[in-house]
Image (cartoon, helix red, strand yellow):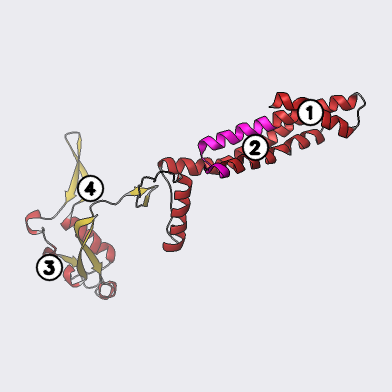
Amino acid sequence: KETQPQVRVRIDYDRASDLGVSVAEIGRTLETLMGSRRVTTYIEGGEEYDVILEGERATQRTPAAMENMYVRSARSAELIPIASLVTLEELADSNRLNRYNRVRALTLEANLEDGFALRDAIAHMQSLVDDKLPDGVVVDYKGQSRDLAQSSNSMAFVMGLGAVVVFLALAAQFESYRHPLIIMLTVPLAIAGGLFGLWITGNSINIYSQIGLVMLVGLAAKNGILIVEFANQLRDEGQPLMDALITACEVRLRPIV
C-alpha cells in the first residue's frame, strides 16, 4: 500500500549544466549530508576502521534543510545552493518494493471457486494481461501456477521423446519399421479418446489426467503389440492378411479387456 511518505528530488538538468554542476556531484552531496557515505578506511592498532561522512542529523530532518546545502561549481568554483538546482515533490509510496527474479514485481494471490480449474484461471488472467497491460509487462508464476505451467510445457517434450523411444524399441523387437509404425498409429487415437472422455465428464487437464494419458499410451502400445505379433504369427502359418487381422483382434480382445 502507498502509505510511506517520501520526497522525490527532481534535478533541473539545464540549470545545473549552465552553472557547471554535474548530476553526480548533486547526488553525492545529498547522499553525504542526508544519509552517509563511506569514503575511505584507516588502520590503527591492527584494526581497520571505516571513515564515514554524514551531516548533522539535528539540522537535516526536513526537506527544508536543503536550503542550507551547497555544491561547488566545477566551472566557477563558487558554492551553488542545491535548492536552486532541484525541486521537491512530496508523495506517498510503498514502504518496500517487492522483487521477483531481480525485477520489480506485484504479486497477486487468489483462491479458486469450487469447480473452477487452475488452468482456466491462468488462461483468463493471461487474456486480461494481453488486453489491459502495456507490452513491457512480464507475467510470471509461483507456486502451483508455476508447477502447472512447467508441467504443461514439458508434457509435449516428454510425450514426443517417449514416442521416439518406444518406436525404436519396437523397431528392434520386430526388426522392421512398418510394424512399429502401425502400432504407434494407435496412440493418437487413444489420446483422442482420453481427451474426449475428459470433455464429456467436464474434467480438466491436470497433473493426474496427464499421468492417466501417459498410462493410456502405454496400454495402447501394449495392446497393439499383442495384436500385431499374433497377426504376424497367423500370417506365418499361411492365413491371408485380412483373415489374420480379424482373427488376431477377436482372439486378443479378451486379454486386452
Q: CA distance from mark 3 to mark 2?
A: 70 Å
Q: Which residue is mark 2?
A: 161
User: Is 160 a magenta residue?
Assistant: no
Q: Amino acid at mark 1?
A: Glu
| Quadrant in which the N terminus is drawn | bottom left
Q: Which residue is mark 3?
A: 67
**Residue 55: x and y, percent?**
13, 55
Position of 148 with respect to 107 (left or right) is right
Q: CA distance from mark 1 to mark 3?
A: 98 Å
Regarding residue 174, the answer to whether it shows in the image is no
| Quadrant in which the C terminus is drawn | top right
Residue at point 87%, 34% (across, down): 242
Q: CA distance from mark 2 to mark 1?
A: 32 Å
Mark 3 or 2, nearer chain start: 3
Q: Secondary structure at mark 2?
A: helix
Q: In the rendered image, which quarter is residue 115 located in?
A: top left
Q: Residue lying at the far left in this picture: please name it.
A: 58
Disc 2 vs disc 1: Cβ atoms closer than 8 Å? Answer: no
Q: Which residue is mark 4?
A: 40
Which residue is more in the foreground, 65 or 182?
182
Mark 3 residue crowding within 10 angstroms, few (<14) / some (14–19) / many (20+): few
Q: Is residue 7 above or below residue 75?
A: above
Mark 2 or 4, nearer chain start: 4
Mark 2 residue crowding within 10 angstroms, few (<14) / some (14–19) / many (20+): few
Mark 1 or 3, nearer chain start: 3
**Residue 110: x and y, percent?**
36, 47
Q: Secondary structure at mark 4?
A: strand
Q: Amino acid at mark 4?
A: Thr
Start and end of the magenta stretch? 199-220
Which numbered disc covers residue 250? 1
Q: Is residue 124 above or below residue 225?
A: below
